Image (cartoon, helix red, strand yellow):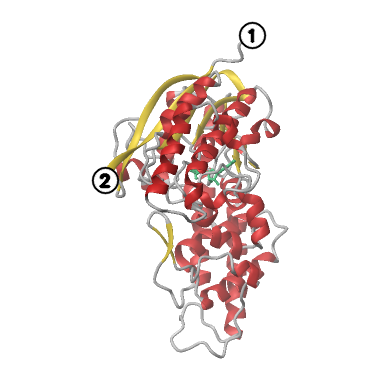
């Protein structure tokens, strides 16, 4: 007998803690709002930004918007794919767009549930054994961990141009060597369907177990680990993936497609008049560089090989930090007439001069604010043609005071820009507050809820 639509998926409660922080649109503060329940981790934890918005937030807007299986959800800044995974778990089709090549890879793997978990596990064990043998032949016991010194071992290293892109000391020489040996063994399976899952498992192991990185929440370099078991760390991550895939085996879930692209060009990638809802968290004007967060895995696994490739990728980003501003940028012209944004940029510039901050980057603080809102305005303008009339949108953004302590009310300004473009502002929900040490204030992270009424004829 053909299963009915509702029998196709496991109930969402099988994956997520519905009781946890159910009122995610309410007054939660700080960590509680971002915490992941243990049973909210399936698929999401294959690879995740430390500050990704939590699955339960997405889930609550899916419910709030009354989204059903016939609908299509878009996340134009999909990052590591939280919205896409959550939509799929609800049995709803989703499309993602992401400008960072590694995050694009990660989210597209996270929504690919069509591979055989038993085969992945079997092949991973085979690859693990052959890698351990190779290392043994070099005198390296991956599980025994290095005790003496390393001088005799010829270690694999990255190409110097690629190595130059890494945060200094983000990975120690022996763990890097072992990772590159494992990567070579893995690459022999490049043509196989399970390869991408195995590679994502290596990325997660690399970031959270093998490297010296720590996230607090910004990425930084901690105490160097001279040695660490690489193959076992990778197998642990493979295991996590295979366990989750086993949960959904034999069931049918809708497709989620992820495009590598620029959300400011969304209409060139997505069918007109097709999207019923947008649930997303775009960058904020907060000096965060998303290519830094993903730098180690992007470089070690070969997604970015040199400065030129990094720069080309960054050009597709919304300008939210001064290190990602380029000659010829002109998104600021889209907010030329927005008095408040112009005033904020002027105040930042005035404060910069008062404080005598004259470095090349500091001189860009005022401009990047205009470029940021101009870019978001471009995105919202382009988005209109892909939305169905009545489409509902949730944009999660944070207020910011980092540019020389001038307050930027991101949510309110975006709401303003959206209204000028013909969207209806339904409300602004408080998602959570964050304590900002610089200003000793609680900054709001909000969800700007919009509705697209359709083009006025
Ligand atoms: C706040 S993060 C999104 C995190 C996401 N909600 C998740 O679950 O991981 C913002 C994302 O927007 C991406 N981004 C920045 N500019 C973009 C652009 N112009 N087009 C598409 N993605 C962009 C960044 O690379 C980053 O991954």
Above or below, comparing residue 36 to residue 426 in the picture: below
The response on whether ligand 1 sits within 8 Å of label 2 is: no
- Residue 69 in the image: x percent, y percent? 55, 26
Secondary element at tag 1: loop
55 and 287: which one is in front?
287
Q: In the image, is 112 to the left or to the right of 144?
A: right
Q: Give the number of the disc on residue 457.
A: 1
User: Which callout, 1 or 2, points to the residue nearer the camera?
Assistant: 2
Quadrant for residue 440, please give it: top left
**Label 2: how many Cα within 10 Å (few below 14, some 14–19, many 20+):** few
Which residue is label 2 attached to? 440
Identify the residue at image location x=43%, y=62%: 220
Identify the residue at image location x=46%, y=74%: 228
Above or below, comparing residue 283 to residue 451 in the picture: below
Residue 438 visible in image: yes
- Residue 373 in the image: x percent, y percent? 52, 35
Secondary element at tag 2: loop
- Which quarter holds ligand 1? top right
């Amino acid at each position: 007998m053909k299963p009915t639509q509702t029998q196709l998926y496991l109930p969402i409660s099988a994956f997520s803690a519905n009781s946890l922080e159910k009122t995610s649109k309410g007054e939660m503060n700080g960590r509680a709002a971002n915490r992941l329940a243990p049973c909210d981790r399936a698929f999401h934890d294959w690879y995740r930004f430390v500050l990704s918005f939590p699955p339960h937030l997405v889930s609550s807007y899916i419910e709030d918007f009354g989204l059903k299986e016939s609908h299509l959800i878009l996340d134009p800044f999909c990052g590591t794919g939280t919205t896409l995974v959550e939509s799929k778990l609800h049995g709803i089709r989703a499309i993602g767009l992401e400008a960072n090549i590694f995050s694009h890879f990660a989210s597209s793997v996270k929504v690919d549930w069509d591979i055989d978990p038993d085969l992945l596990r079997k092949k991973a064990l085979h690859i693990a054994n052959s890698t351990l043998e190779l290392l043994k032949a070099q005198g390296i016991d991956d599980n025994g961990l290095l005790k003496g010194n390393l001088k005799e071992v010829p270690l694999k290293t990255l190409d110097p141009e690629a190595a130059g892109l890494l945060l200094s000391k983000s990975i120690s020489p022996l763990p890097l060597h072992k990772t590159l040996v494992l990567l070579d063994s893995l690459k022999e399976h490049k043509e196989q369907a399970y390869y991408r899952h195995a590679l994502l498992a290596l990325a997660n192991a690399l970031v959270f177990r093998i490297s010296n990185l720590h996230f607090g929440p910004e990425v930084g370099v901690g105490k160097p680990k001279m040695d660490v078991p690489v193959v076992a760390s990778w197998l642990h991550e493979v295991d996590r993936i295979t366990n989750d895939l086993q949960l959904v085996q034999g069931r049918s879930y809708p497709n989620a497609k992820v495009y590598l692209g620029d959300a400011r060009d969304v209409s060139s990638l997505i069918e007109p008049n097709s999207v019923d809802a947008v649930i997303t968290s775009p960058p904020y004007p907060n000096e965060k560089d998303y290519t830094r967060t993903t730098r180690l895995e992007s470089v070690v696994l070969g997604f970015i090989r040199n400065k030129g490739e990094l720069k080309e990728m960054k050009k597709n980003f919304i300008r939210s930090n001064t290190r990602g501003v380029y000659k010829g940028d002109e998104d600021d012209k889209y907010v030329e007439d927005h008095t408040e944004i112009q005033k904020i940029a002027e105040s930042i510039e005035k404060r910069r001069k008062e404080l005598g901050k004259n470095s090349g980057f500091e001189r860009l603080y005022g401009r990047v604010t205009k470029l940021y809102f101009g870019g978001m305005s471009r995105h919202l303008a382009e988005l209109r043609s892909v939305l169905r009339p009545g489409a509902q949108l949730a944009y999660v953004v944070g207020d910011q005071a980092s540019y020389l302590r001038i307050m930027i009310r991101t949510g309110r300004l975006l709401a303003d820009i959206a209204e000028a473009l013909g969207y209806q502002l339904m409300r602004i929900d408080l998602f959570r507050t964050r304590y900002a040490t610089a200003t000793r204030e609680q900054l709001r992270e909000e969800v700007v809820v919009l509705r697209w009424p359709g083009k006025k004829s």
